[in-house]
Amino acid sequence: MKLKQDRYGVFWYNQQQILNWTQADFDNKAAEFASAGINIVMTFSSTHFRWSFYPWWKEINATVAKIVNACHKYNIRVVEHHSSHLTHNPRSQKEWKAFYNTLRTRQSTIEMFPGLKEYIACGDPEILPGVNLSDCRQIDGRTGDFARTVYTGYGHCFNNPDYRKVYFSYLEDLYATGIDGIMTDDVQYFGYHNACACKYCREKFKTETGFDLPLPADWGKFHGNFDNPVFIEWLRFRVRSTEQFQRDVNAHFKSLGLNLLRPNYATTTFNCNTVAYPFEAAGDLWSCVFQENMFSSVIRTAWPTWYNIAEHRFSMGRRYKVPSMSMFYPARFDDYYFCWSLAKACNHLLMASPEGGDINEVEEKFAPFDENNPILENASDLPDIGFFEPRSSLDLSPEPLKNAIWPMNVWLQGALFRNLRNAILFEDDSLEEFLKYPLVVLCGANMLSDEHLELLKKYCQQGGRLFVCGTFGIYRPDGSRREHPEKVFGIKAQLSDFVPTPQSKFTWKNQTVELSPQEESRIFEKICGETEIVAETNDGKTIGISAMNGNFVWLAGGIGGRKPEDHFYDLRISRWLEVPGRANAQKNPEESLHNISGAILELLTERKPHIACSSRDYLATIFLSSDRKSGEIHLVNTSKVLPESGESVSHDDLFTNFMPDAAKNRQDIAVTLCIPHKITGAKAFSPEFDNVPDLKFSQNGDTVSISIPAETFAGYLKIKIELKKI
């Protein structure tokens, strides 16, 4: 089956495949992928930590060659994916058990290779004359000893020339198998944020910055001191090192005359990059940008967070003109269908795999729909709001969790539950890019350059509305403090320390949003300049002001955002255990997100959202084609998915709206669009039915109402609209 665009799958090769499969077995599996519409496979293996299987590289590569031979018979491209540097090194019974469980989940055992257990326990091969593998390990600055990872082992340093020489040689051996792409995974520094301080990093850091890294005796005074410019430079140095490594991988295979696929992913985005992962820094290298929605995350609780990360991937993909994708680990029809629907709603490709295997039988059921309904390329997502990603603040300023990550999720998810369309703005975006958005949200941006502040002032002067939440710009990029960054907007204000606030009100253009009491909030104590009060507590304290004719809006407090329960997050239940358990869900914050943060954002946009739905049960998104002659609306039935407060959840929970026999919508649904186009047709599509019904719609100016009759669909519906410019 030939698809109109790429469709990814995961080709697992574990103990059975490596030791027992013949070429015919691989050919049969490749045929299954082809029947499921897959035209790119990413390999994954129980040998993912490739350096822990150093003596068996020849056997592993022989298996990769068989995969390539099989897949190429069906015009399927192969991207080899493995950890670039991590190793398993258990040091306790508990860690050995974790290693065994990893192998078991990936359908393998410690007996897969003779001598593997002994090698894992004490193997340290000579990889070059006089150089052992352990000589390449990352060094923990606290101890001067090998840096441990979160994976009960060690990792190697990307600045170590011996490691690089041997690894790049290994990549050449992989390229010789005929692979079409390479994903060098886990290009990160570990040591619980204290690596690397090896001799090569020390020398390179000194050369690049003129600074010396401290010895272990002084490391405690250095690490975590955000007032120390040397520490800030070291954090930046780590990202430069990982970025350069990935760029060198590309330069290396291009020097061999190869042009390989380079899909790459990150799991989280709006988080502190403590491991110096260069996903964004090297973004121009990637042929596809995607997110890994973690294996042990409970989809029911995690999907709002993943949805907002997907918005980041779409913005990043648009920036580099490459596809964006979501990776999930579904194991059944219903959770696959739900994950597939979320990907569609984000205009993402999908890569799905239960850990250790594939889900081809289910994917085959969706392949015809995907063939006839590819995601839009170079699409516009019609954003209502631009969210500034405060990358420097997340990575280089104190307490990013409470100051930026959690508050940012509150506002992003508030927009989500109002079906407001978001795009992500990056730190190096131009004023022209900012001006594409009538509302820009600045949340958690405590580190801003003078150039950033000047750009934001110009944005307001040229008619954009900037909504600032909490403190901002109080650090310069070198970590030094800045007093009163708000002066660039023509005002001066003093914020209190964190104090409790009673119930409050946010008022905009005679419309009011009630704000709940907060344990941790800020109030304005002194205000100078031409401002208006837009939010105050019931006891008369000011917590929100506007300036520049309402184009600068600053909300200092009154909104919860400094606690994890203020938003949805990815509740995790380990799937690596023999019997995965259950957990009680967090407090359900959907009502406050919809009624407070989402409502404020909708008021500040001062125009109808691009898309609205008559029922809050549905996630609704819209994308327009690059020529603006057509568009797609996506509806995902999210009712009964998010758990109630304290509800017991597990990975086994069913997605009832996405079961094969799920009940259809009982009521008519109305979707309202506000776009400067005339709608000339609207058709409904879903994997739940074969016929393509026309939908009734009406239009009044730039407002369109589309009616979806009762009994049309259960889980997912796509509406294709034909357009003419008004």
Image (cartoon, rainbow, N blue to C red):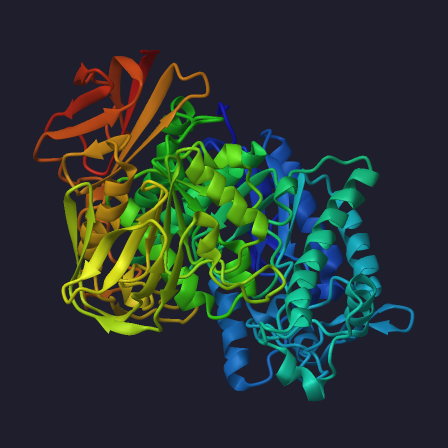
493 or 128: nearer the eye? 493
Instruction: Say whether residue 345 is left or right of residue 141.
Output: left
Image quarter for residue 251?
A: top right
Position above or below: 428 against 687: below
- Outermost residue, left direction? 667
Q: Position of residue 460 (x, y in %)?
A: 42, 39
Instruction: Give the image location of residue 260, x and y in percent.
Output: 69, 38
**Which residue is depicted at the point 55% across and 67% down?**
481
Identified at 37% across, 30% down, the residue is 382
The residue at the far bottom in this view is 217
Number of marks present in the image shown: 0
* Image position, residue 317 (x, y; %): 52, 37
Q: Is residue 375 visible?
A: yes
Q: Identify the residue at image location x=49%, y=39%.
A: 458
Q: State the residue at coordinates (15%, 26%).
A: 708
Residue farthest front in this picture: 529
Q: Residue furthest right?
A: 129
Q: Position of residue 216 (x, y in %)?
A: 71, 85
- Horizontal side of 198 relative to 189 (left or right) equals right
Q: Quadrant of the C terminus?
A: top left
Q: Is residue 296 above or below residue 390?
A: below
685 vs 202: above or below = above
Direction from residue 405 to residue 693 in the image, left or right: left
Q: Nearer the viewer, residue 354 or 696?
A: 696
Which of 96 and 512 lies nearest the eye of the viewer?
Answer: 512
Res. 7 in view: no
